[in-house]
Image (cartoon, rainbow, N blue to C red):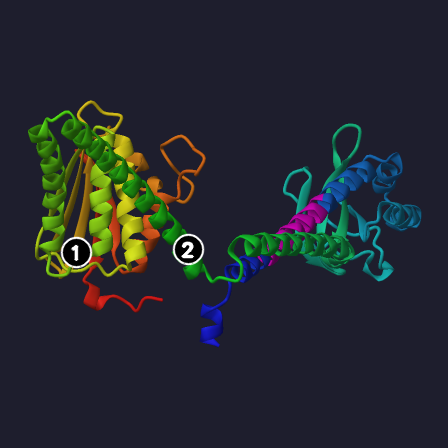
């Protein structure tokens, strides 16, 4: 089962991630809609009870009934009136009571004459609360009934039971469920489209092999550019030497050829002096030397002989070094003092350190972490795109158990890698 998970294609992983994201978002939306509906229904209940209680309390019929000294007569008049308002307003109860809380009306006639269950304000004011009365828990609003002179003569309470609120909420659940299912369906459709698009680009390759394919492409590109520059430089020197020989100026021709050999041999000696040389890295450095000279950049390389072999494959090593050097050359080309320095040395923890420095203007501290993000670049986009190289560098280096950091004065990308003997098996 573990093997199946490791070999799952990139397209399948994209599909699973997007599908899970759609389900999670759908669930969160459903929870939000339920909570919002519950809040809305409760707010509506508070608004309706408050409006009904205030309207009922201001009714002349209620005022006259409470001013009467005959409570039975008041009940006979107000009970039918309150029941009709309950039906019209969609409430569960309206209770009219005297100033001391004695019920005059109630949906359950057996409760008439009893004491109101709920909070009666100490001063004439409207109060909305949730309280458990004879009909169970309810949201209720109590408001005072006063004479035209302002004397308190009674109270009116209007309420909706929480059971009714729950019933209203349940009636709205199908709409919430439909919205959730629609969102999940849209997300699943997007996941299917994303899987097809990813499969067209990456086939059935797992993510590791996709990264390796990108690394291979970057390696071939940077090696190609380096070798093209080297071939171009050597071609120019050979043409100049041949022309000098044809003009009979043999000493100058020999000097050009000797200088070419000396510069290349100096770098070859550094590369081959290591106990465990990396031919791919050596070839890349030779090519980049020519590319630097072509761009008018002072090329500096220091390789310590006891530097261990890199744990990276040749393709990944070329990709990492090539991208760092290309970025350094681009930065140095914009400065007056153009130079790029590559240092390869052993680390005190039995690893390898690669440092690529340049004379460029540097990277602001706030952006030093962002430069490693996929798609981010401080350079303008070109035909090949930007924002891939440094993200790939970090992916390759961390995948090998190493780390990459950047610092200023001068701008230096520092890569630490464990020794080759401690690396994980390569695919």
Residue occupying the point 72% across, 57% down: 177
Placement of 30 over or under 153, stated as above or below: below
- How many badges with numbers are in the image? 2
* Residue underneath mark 2: 213
Placement of 180 over or under 46, stated as above or below: below
- Per the rendering, the mark at residue 121 is none
Which residues are drawn in magenta? 21-43
- Viewer-closest of 242 and 50: 242
Determine whether, in the image, residue 258 is placed left or right of residue 138: left
Answer whether residue 180 is magenta in the image.
no
Q: Position of residue 91 (x, y in %)?
A: 81, 50
Residue occupying the point 27% across, 59% down: 312
Q: The C terminus is located in which quarter?
A: bottom left
**Within the image, what quadrant is residue 237 found in?**
top left
Local packing at callout 2 (Cα closer than 10 Å; few below 14, some 14-19, many 20+) is: some
Residue occupying the point 85% across, 56% down: 107
Placement of 64 over or under 10, stated as above or below: above
* Residue underneath mark 1: 352
Q: How far is the residue under mark 2 from the one under mark 1? A: 25 Å
Answer whether residue 40 is magenta in the image.
yes
């Amino acid at each position: 089962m573990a093997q199946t998970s490791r070999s799952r294609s990139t397209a399948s992983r994209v599909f699973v991630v997007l599908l899970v994201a759609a389900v999670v978002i759908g669930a969160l939306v459903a929870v939000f809609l339920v909570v919002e509906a519950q809040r809305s229904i409760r707010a509506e209940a508070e608004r309706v009870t408050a409006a009904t209680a205030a309207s009922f309390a201001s009714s002349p019929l209620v005022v006259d009934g409470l001013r009467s000294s005959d409570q039975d007569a008041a009940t006979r008049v107000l009970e039918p009136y309150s029941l009709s308002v309950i039906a019209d307003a969609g409430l569960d109860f309206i209770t009219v009571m005297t100033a001391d809380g004695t019920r005059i009306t109630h949906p359950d006639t057996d409760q008439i004459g009893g004491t109101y269950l709920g909070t009666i304000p100490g001063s004439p004011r409207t109060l909305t609360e949730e309280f458990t009365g004879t009909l169970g828990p309810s949201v209720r609003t109590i408001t005072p009934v006063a004479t035209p002179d302002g004397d308190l003569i009674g109270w009116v309470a209007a309420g909706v039971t929480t059971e009714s609120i729950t019933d209203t909420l349940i009636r709205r659940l199908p709409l919430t469920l439909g919205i959730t299912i629609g969102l999940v369906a849209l997300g699943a459709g997007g996941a299917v489209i994303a899987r097809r698009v990813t499969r067209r680009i990456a086939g059935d390759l797992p993510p590791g092999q996709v990264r390796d394919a990108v690394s291979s492409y970057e390696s071939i590109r940077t090696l190609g550019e380096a070798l093209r520059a080297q071939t171009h430089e050597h071609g120019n020197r050979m043409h100049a030497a041949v022309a000098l020989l044809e003009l009979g100026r043999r000493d100058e021709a020999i000097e050009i050829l000797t200088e070419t050999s000396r510069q290349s041999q100096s770098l070859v000696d550094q590369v081959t002096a290591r106990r465990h040389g990396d031919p791919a890295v050596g070839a890349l450095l030779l090519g980049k030397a020519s590319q630097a000279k072509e761009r008018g950049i002072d090329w500096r390389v220091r390789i310590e002989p006891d530097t261990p072999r890199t744990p990276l494959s040749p393709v990944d090593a070329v990709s990492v070094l090539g991208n760092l050097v290309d970025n350094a050359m681009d930065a140095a080309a914009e400065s007056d003092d153009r130079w790029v320095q590559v240092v390869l040395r052993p680390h005190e923890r039995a690893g390898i350190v690669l440092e690529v420095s340049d004379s460029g203007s540097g990277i602001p501290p706030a952006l030093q972490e962002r430069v490693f993000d996929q798609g981010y670049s401080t350079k303008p986009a070109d035909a090949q795109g930007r924002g891939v190289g440094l993200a790939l560098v970090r992916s390759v280096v961390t995948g090998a158990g190493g780390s990459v950091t950047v610092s200023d004065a001068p701008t230096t990308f520092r890569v630490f890698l464990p020794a080759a003997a401690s690396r994980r098996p390569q695919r």
